[in-house]
């Protein structure tokens, strides 16, 4: 009986944890490193999340931080200014594709993990 009660409590914890955690797919629109906020462009509209020192970024090259990501995005935005109008020139992709995993809800929702989208490999023209 005790085992059944412990199992029930553990399952309840997983269900409640799953409800509180969120997963959002979209493109990073902006990163405010001073306010520690990330704005994500989703199909349901823009969503802004806070990040902490515990928040991590996975899937990028090397050790990615929010500061490095903001710097990368600024460089890409600068390159896109040089791209031909309406073309896919230098850096004109419109944001980094990611999946954001959050914990908490409402104003207390914070990023626990950002999963960077894998880039498609270029095919050899042989």
Image: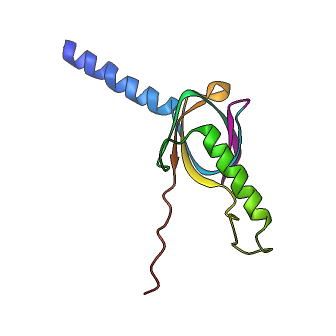
Instruction: State the residue in front, 12 or 91.
Output: 91
Quarter the C terminus occupies: bottom left
Q: Residue at x 67, y 44 (%)?
A: 70
Q: In this view, does 123 lie above or below 64?
A: below
Q: In this view, does 99 lie above or below 113?
A: below
Question: What is the chief secondary structure element of the magenta stretch?
Answer: strand
Residue 53: percent from left, percent from top: 56, 26
Instruction: State the residue in front, 51 or 81.
Output: 81
Residue 22: percent from left, percent from top: 54, 37
Q: Residue furthest top?
A: 2
Q: In this view, does 101 lie above or below 61?
A: above
Q: Residue at x 80, y 63 (%)?
A: 81
Res 52 quadrant in image? top right
Is residue 12 visible from the viewing direction of this image? yes
Q: Residue at x 20, y 17 (%)?
A: 3
Q: In this view, does 71 lie above or below 117?
A: above
Quarter the N terminus occupies: top left
Q: Residue furthest bottom?
A: 126
Indicate yes or no whether the magenta region holds residue 28.
no
User: Which stretch is magenta?
Assistant: 34-47
Indicate yes or no whether the magenta region holds residue 35.
yes
Residue 8: percent from left, percent from top: 30, 22
Res 93 quadrant in image? bottom right
Is residue 44 visible from the viewing direction of this image? no
Residue 71: percent from left, percent from top: 68, 46
Horizontal side of 51 relative to 8 (left or right) equals right
Q: Residue at x 72, y 50 (%)?
A: 74
Instruction: State the residue in front, 46 or 15.
Output: 46
């Amino acid at each position: 009986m005790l085992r059944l009660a412990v199992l029930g409590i553990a399952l309840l914890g997983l269900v409640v944890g799953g409800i509180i955690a969120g997963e959002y797919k979209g493109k990073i629109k902006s990163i405010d490193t001073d306010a520690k906020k990330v704005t994500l462009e989703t199909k349901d509209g823009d969503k802004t999340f806070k990040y902490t020192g515990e928040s991590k970024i996975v899937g990028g090259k090397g050790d990615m931080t929010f500061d490095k990501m903001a710097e990368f995005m600024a460089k890409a935005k600068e390159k896109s200014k040089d791209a031909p109008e309406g073309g896919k020139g230098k850096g004109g992709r419109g944001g980094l594709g990611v999946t954001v995993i959050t914990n908490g809800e409402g104003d207390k929702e914070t990023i626990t993990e950002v999963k960077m989208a894998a880039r498609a490999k270029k095919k050899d023209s042989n």
